[in-house]
Amino acid sequence: RVTVQSPQGNGSINGYLVRPASAGMNKLPAVLVVHENRGLTPYIEDVARRLAVANYMAFAPDALTSLGGYPKGPDAAKNEEEAAKTFQKLDREKVFEDFVASATWLKNRPDSTGKLGAVGFCFGGGIVNS
């Protein structure tokens, strides 16, 4: 779990950073994983882990950071509902800047090759296309 500074966005954004255990200090290509309109769900964390298994460094930011982050609790369906409602309150321009800051940070990390890809789901697909 890391926090990326985003001065043009909401100030900062939290996210989930994963690297393959076998990578050691080797530089890796990076992938930004952009979630759907529910924030950093367990599924999106799993996508990031699968990218690490495929020998990429992956970062999955949580657009809901400024509003408390993706809700945690034992009822997954309730968490998803709450997240979708909270998501509607976000300032989309600031959230876009949070993702730009995340991509820049990920690409420029010392353990990155400087090669950056992005994958998005639903809302995230629009972010990736932008």
Image (cartoon, rainbow, N blue to C red):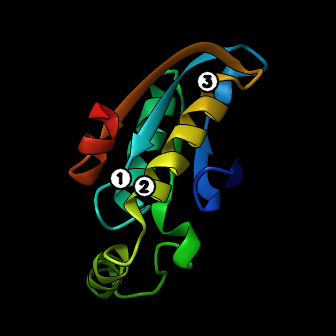
* Residue 54 shows in the view: yes
Residue at position x 33%, y 42% from top? 127
Give the structural element (helix, strand or loop) at label 1.
loop
Left or right: 51 as drawn, with respect to 69? left
Label 3 and label 2: CA atoms lie apart by 21 Å
Residue at position x 33%, y 68% from top? 38
The image position of residue 98, as x and y in percent, is: 54, 50
Label 1 and label 3: CA atoms lie apart by 18 Å
Residue type indicated by callout 3:
Lys
The quarter of the rendered structure image containing the C terminus is: top left
Q: Are marks 3 and 2 in contact (CB under 8 Å)?
A: no
Q: Which residue is mark 1?
A: 35
56 shown above or below 97: above
In front of the other: 61 or 9: 9
The image position of residue 4, as x and y in percent, is: 69, 49
The image position of residue 16, as x and y in percent, is: 58, 51
Residue type indicated by callout 1:
His
Q: Residue furthest left?
A: 122
In front of the other: 111 or 13: 13
Label 1 and label 2: CA atoms lie apart by 16 Å
Left or right: 30 as drawn, with respect to 48? right
Q: Which residue is mark 2?
A: 93
Give the structural element (helix, strand or loop) at label 3.
helix
Q: Which residue is mark 3?
A: 107
Residue at position x 48%, y 41% from top? 49
Give the structural element (helix, strand or loop) at label 2.
helix
